[in-house]
Image (spheres, helix red, strand yellow):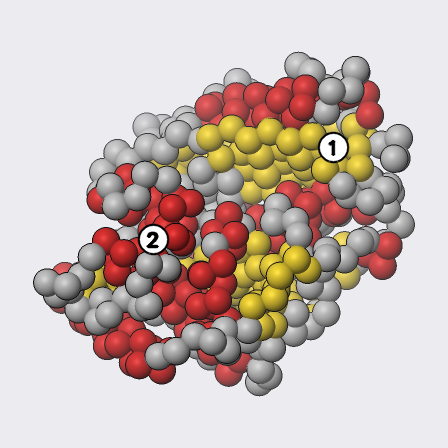
Amino acid sequence: MSDRWILALDQGTTSTTVLLLDSSNFSIQGRMTVEVPQHFPAPGQVEHDPDVIWQGVLMAIDGALKSTGVANASERIGAIGITNQRETTVLWDRRTGQPVHRAIVWQDRRTAPHCQTLKAQGAERLVFEKAGLLLDPYFSGTKLRWLLDHVENARPRAERGELAFGTIDSWLIYKLSGGAVHCTDVTNASRTMMMDLRTLAWDETLLATLGVPDSVLPQIVGSAEVVATTKGIAGLRDGIVISGIAGDQQAALFGQGCYRSGDVKCTYGTGAFILMNIGDKPLPSRHRLLTTVAWKIADQTTYAMEGSSFIAGAAVQWLRDGLGIISHASEIEALARTVSDAGECVFVPALTGLGAPHWAPEARGLITGIGRDTTRAHLARATLDGIALSIADLVAAMESDAGEKVRSIRVDGGASANGLLMELQAALARAEVLRPAVLETTALGAGMLAAIGAGLCPSMDALPQLPISQRFDGAAMQGMDALQDRWRTAIRRTLLVAATSA
């Protein structure tokens, strides 16, 4: 076993996980997860308390260290890697470190009217061409604008340089460094609508369009380099390097070993996100997919094409918490397997709007085909169908944009443990689904980047490839064509309702 461990910090939407990884083989030596409380102040609004996130990070670090059973475990930490929920937006006082408002979470839709105004002004083409993104409340730029406009004195204070903006990676680096460093990496910056994909720098035209002063922005850095050191953190010695940063989906792409152009992974968490490595040049999508930075190591930048489904595991949580159909999320597979299919029932899981390729923030969930014979088992099956169908649409769009067939999809995230969902995904996407033995690839990717950045691993070539524990080909699934026909009809209805209510 190596003398050095890597602390991989995965700060997600519903939980914070810390893994302690052996830097020689990336085996997990310690682990702790802490839940993140959600706040829903109004319909379509989702917030987190940044200070509560930070306290959860400290709890997770402490728990992971204790879980090793090793005395003075913190002395073995040689580097820290951070991965995070990406577009979630924090604004804080540079001097005191106090947030001026709760963090606005990536799922939050409050800036939809502002996005519509910008679209009417013709700004979407500019955003797409420069940032590779669409004008949608999903991204950080309009969230930051909302904070500047709605928090008392925020705009003048920001213009005077008193306030700092960041996605969650920036917030955690600021806290871990004792307030010494304000930075973000290129992957997170590429999700703000404020960075030019080609120059990898904040863009003056985009900032002017969004109404954001550059005085509030962090420095943009690479994904695998030393950017800060720890200072004044209980349980950690001072001077541990922070040397790996990537947004959660990019970290998962890296952790899955998708280093070649054409490699694809899908993460099933609160939402589901599918990314394809597209090499060293940003490729614009014809199907309203996103172009994003996958990672930047030394002077080499790799790009990815991304499709986002805002609701995946969250739909299962809704069945549990909202409808009471199941008591635990893990029960859904067994329940769904008690029926051969969902009958005529189709569930479009647009509970917080539709992402790619539709981009309809005003859309809401729709269940069609309910009859007297519909049971909770049919609803459970329709929920899994809806998650897999959403991703299958993204795969089809990705294949058209890239001009090549997606033959395999590496999967991770909590819901990828659901075997029925993976069978459905393989059948509907018409691609082999590969599930690795380790599903915590997001944290693993952050740890691998940190190892490269700190010099604990000489290069990407020295990184281990995750072993595949199970393969799904979906060949035994019946009725997929008819299901997709019903799905397309349901999507059209969802978009029609959204258009009439906008």
Determine crowd level at label 2: few under 14, some 14-19, many 20+ residues with C-alpha closer than 10 A. some
Front residue of 445 and 127 = 445
Place of residue 138 in the rendered image (x, y in percent of width and height, measured from the top left): 40, 53
**In this rendering, does residue 130 appear at all?**
no
| Depicted 308 relative to depicted 319: above or below | below
Place of residue 80 in the rendered image (x, y in percent of width and height, measured from the top left): 72, 34
How many marks do you count on the picture?
Answer: 2
Considering every residue shown, the one lying at the far front of the view is 338
Where is residue 279, by image quadrant? bottom right
The reply to whether the C-beta atoms of the residues labelled 1 and 2 are less than 8 Å apart is no
Where is residue 372, by image quadrant? bottom left
Q: Earlier in the sequence, mark 1 or mark 2?
A: 1
| Depicted 91 relative to depicted 381: above or below | above
Question: Which quadrant of the rendered structure holds the N terminus?
Answer: top right
Determine crowd level at label 1: few under 14, some 14-19, many 20+ residues with C-alpha closer than 10 A. some
Q: CA gap, disc 1 to disc 2? A: 35 Å
Q: Amino acid at mark 1?
A: Gln
Residue at 69% across / 16% down in the picture?
235
**In this rendering, does residue 151 appear at all?**
yes
- The disc placed on residue 46 is none
Residue at 46% across / 40% down in the picture?
13
Residue at 34% across / 44% down in the picture?
317
Q: Which residue is mark 2?
A: 335
- The disc placed on residue 29 is 1
Place of residue 502 in the rendered image (x, y in percent of width and height, measured from the top left): 17, 61
Residue at 37% across / 40% down in the picture?
328
Judged left or right of residue 105, residue 408 is right
Place of residue 296 in the rendered image (x, y in percent of width and height, measured from the top left): 72, 56
| Depicted 207 relative to depicted 409: above or below | above
**SS at mark 1?**
strand
Front residue of 365 and 427 = 427
Considering every residue shown, the one lying at the far left of the view is 372
